[in-house]
Amino acid sequence: MTGAAPPRVKITYCAECGYEGQTLELARALMLEFGSRLSAIELIPWDSGTFDVSVAGQLVHSMRREGGFPDYEEIKKAVRAHLTA
Amino acid sequence: MTIDRARFEQGLTYAAFKAQMTRNLDRVEENERRVELRPEDVAAFRGLPRPVNVVVLAEDWCGDVIANLPVLGRIAQESGRLNVRVFLRDQNDDIMQRYLNQGKYKSIPVFVFLDESFRELGHWIERPASVTELRAERRREIFAAHPEFGAPDASVDQLPEDVRGRLQAELQKMRDDTTSFANAEVIREIRDLVTRVAA
């Protein structure tokens, strides 16, 4: 690892679609996996069926683009890639 | 899966559904107050030859439930011809599986209209297509008028927090401005469906 700056992960979720469970589950998975190697996990309540995840400003999952919820391993992989870049 | 009288009676009355809500009750009651039922709409429902049983799938977190269930509730209250029973979607997946939107989405609310023998007369899902179309058009207009909001399909997480807040406010205003149209469309669609099949 080269000491890349800890990334901020943003999870934008539809707050009118019952997605709180998936949002918290993903946030918890990232907390347990990366701890203080993340600068922050930001949860953004939105609407319109949104479930977007970005890592250090890069959109790595969009429900509108990919369909469905993300595979948490794919999100973790994106975080690891940033940390080791 | 069939719904018989015994299963139907297991559902919550509209009042009982509201009583068990853990959030958004204020929004539901505000929407109830905003529903404008025309005398001819009430008369059409009152003119039904027999009461209609209505199975509703709902959850209290859902924006479309908060918007549209109060419309059905007001029609039921003012006509006295709809027996409404609400089933929580996530506790009644056998019913939900029968009414998936486009065969795959668990969209709510779902209103299933049943005759006195619990034979299905028809069903209604989520919101009128005309409302979806109008709001999509208004949304495009908002983004066109405000370049600072970025592209309509881009993730909002890249917007500065103050800009995101302004976008949220614009979208909420747009939804408020189109509520009267939306409520009228819900009434029209339910009235057309029920009076066509139950007359």
Image (tube, grey):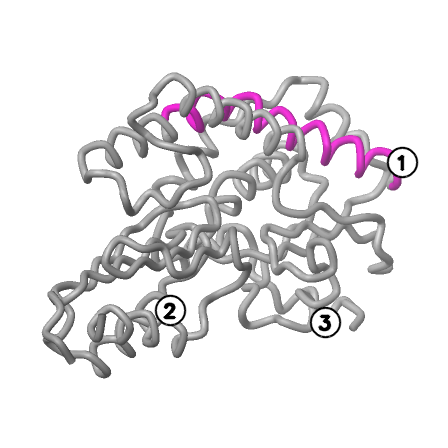
Dot 3 or dot 1: first in sequence order is: 3
Residue B36 against residue B119 in the figure, above or below: above
Q: What secondary structure is marked by label 2? A: helix
Residue B6's label in the rendered image is: 3
Reading the image, the residue beneath label 1 is: B199
The chain containing the residue under callout 3 comes to: B
Q: Amino acid at mark 3?
A: Ala
Residue appearing at x 28%, y 61% in the figure: A55
Residue A57's label in the rendered image is: none
Reading the image, the residue beneath label 2 is: A21
Marks 3 and 1 on same chain: yes
Q: What secondary structure is marked by label 1? A: loop
Frontmost residue, B20 versus A57:
A57
Frontmost residue, A39 versus B167:
A39
Viewer-nearest of labels 2 and 3?
A: 2
Q: Residues within 10 Å of mark 1 (few under 14, many from 20)?
A: few
Q: Is residue B123 magenta?
A: no
Position of the C terminus of chain A by quadrant: bottom left
Magenta-highlighted residues = B173-197
